[in-house]
Amino acid sequence: MAAAAPDFFSDALRREIIRSERERMRAVAIILASLLALALGVANLFPSYTSRIFERDVPGWLPFVGIGPFLLYELGSLKFLGYRASKGQDFPQYARFGNALIETSLPSAIIITLSHYMDPLLVFGFWPPLLYFIFILLSTLRLDFWLSVWTGSVAAVQQMVLVLWLLPIQPWGDIPQETLLFHFSRTLVLFTSGLVAGFVANSLRSQFEKSVRAVAARDRVTNLFGQHVSPAVVDRLLATQSEPPSEIRTVCVLFLDIRGFTAMTRRRSAEETVALLNAFFARMIDVVDRNNGIINKFLGDGFLALFGAPLADPAAARNALAAAQEMIDTVAGWNDAHPGWALRVGIGIHLGEAVTGTVGSPQRKEYTVIGDTVNLAARLEQLTKEMGAQLLVSQSVLDAAPCDGAVDLGPVAIRGYDEKVRVWRIT
């Protein structure tokens, strides 16, 4: 079938990006809240530990300075994004890049804050620089290659700028040149991590796009042909990658009607009636599916089934006839199992040319068949009442699928037809 409509696809992608962004923001907020609680606990409950690793006394409120503003920012951003999502608005691309810049600056802010209380060289060997990798990892949830690359680039540049600013790395300084090489290598790793995260984000986005297109294509088949189409037929329709054309083709049309059903419903509740129809039609659908047909329309207490459309089938008449005979056997089994709901059916089948295609509006289309072939099949089904038969077929059906035991009823006058039509009774 045709690909998803652009508006549908873009809207689904927009909603998925917002959902993914909100999940990422929640994860960041949880990490920041946990980090703040841990830092506050260590700074205020374990002063002996902090005195060993810091050169100066660390105030108990210091974690609020390095982490608190970012946590408030993240919570505010999460609320703002939720508000935009409730209004059906997306997250502008420039805002996403700005958001990535601010978030990825958290480790830098912590490094700068801690450098006032401990040797900067130790700070770079402490845990704050590792936070860069967390933000790069979470950037995959942005589902955007360039945003992940941007996050990795921001982390790499900020880390290297802080190294050059805070550490006395000079030919004549106290820090060996190997340290510069070490930090330069870490910068390359951060940038490379951004690239890798970008490819992962791109892969996640591609998988989502494929899923959306597959669902849209399957929904399109369902909209055109109804939910009563076998999975095998749906798969074959999807494989064509196009909408069924409007054309004249040879089809075999089968009409089924439950005899006297209206009178039966007068003695039953609406719930019982609907439950009966659903249970009965479920069995009929299985029969049609097994014989390579589709149920095109439900008509109250009956339905119209097609064989040879929308997919060509040289054995359409044989399949329709086999389906009809199996339906009659199924009804007999149903009556044995439900004596209080014993049913009688009438089935008419005709093979001929008909106009096929999708009709309706851009909002709602339906696959249908139109023409004399459909009308004659319906007339044959109605004729079963007069003939006391369960299954009547036209001469064209018998020509295409000879059947032992068929009884020739001869030319029969059919309402709406000037000439008589030769009709065969199967059972």
Image: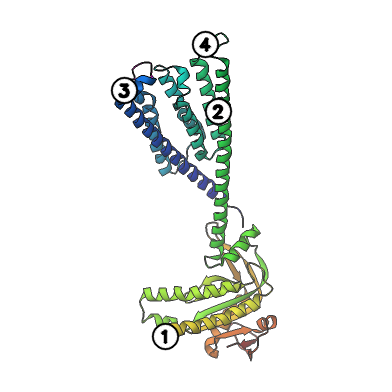
Where in the figure is residue 219, as x and y percent of width and height?
54, 58
Q: Residues within 10 Å of mark 3 (few under 14, many from 20)?
A: some
Residue under label 2, please give it: 153
Please tell me whether mark 4 or mark 2 is closer to you in this view.
4
Q: Determine whether the residue tagged by mark 4 lies in a helix, strand or loop.
A: loop
Is residue 170 positioned above or below 46 on the image? above
Residue under label 4, please give it: 174
In this rendered view, identify the residue nearer to me: 107 or 180: 180
Please tell me whether mark 2 or mark 1 is closer to you in this view.
2
Query: Which three-letter amino acid code belongs to the residue tagged 2?
Result: Ser
Question: Which label was assigned to residue 339?
Answer: 1
For the stretch drawn in magenta, the main secondary structure is loop
Q: Determine whether the residue tagged by mark 1 lies in a helix, strand or loop.
A: helix
Query: Which three-letter amino acid code belongs to the residue tagged 3?
Result: Pro
Query: Which three-letter amino acid code belongs to the residue tagged 1?
Result: Pro
- Give the magenta range: 54-59
Q: Determine whether the residue tagged by mark 2 lies in a helix, strand or loop.
A: helix
Which is more N-terminal, label 1 or label 4?
A: 4
Which is more N-terminal, label 2 or label 3?
A: 3
- Cα distance in 3D space between marks 3 and 2: 37 Å
Which is more N-terminal, label 1 or label 2?
A: 2
Q: Residues within 10 Å of mark 1 (few under 14, many from 20)?
A: few
Where in the figure is residue 358, as x and y percent of width and height?
59, 63
- Residue 57 belongs to magenta span: yes
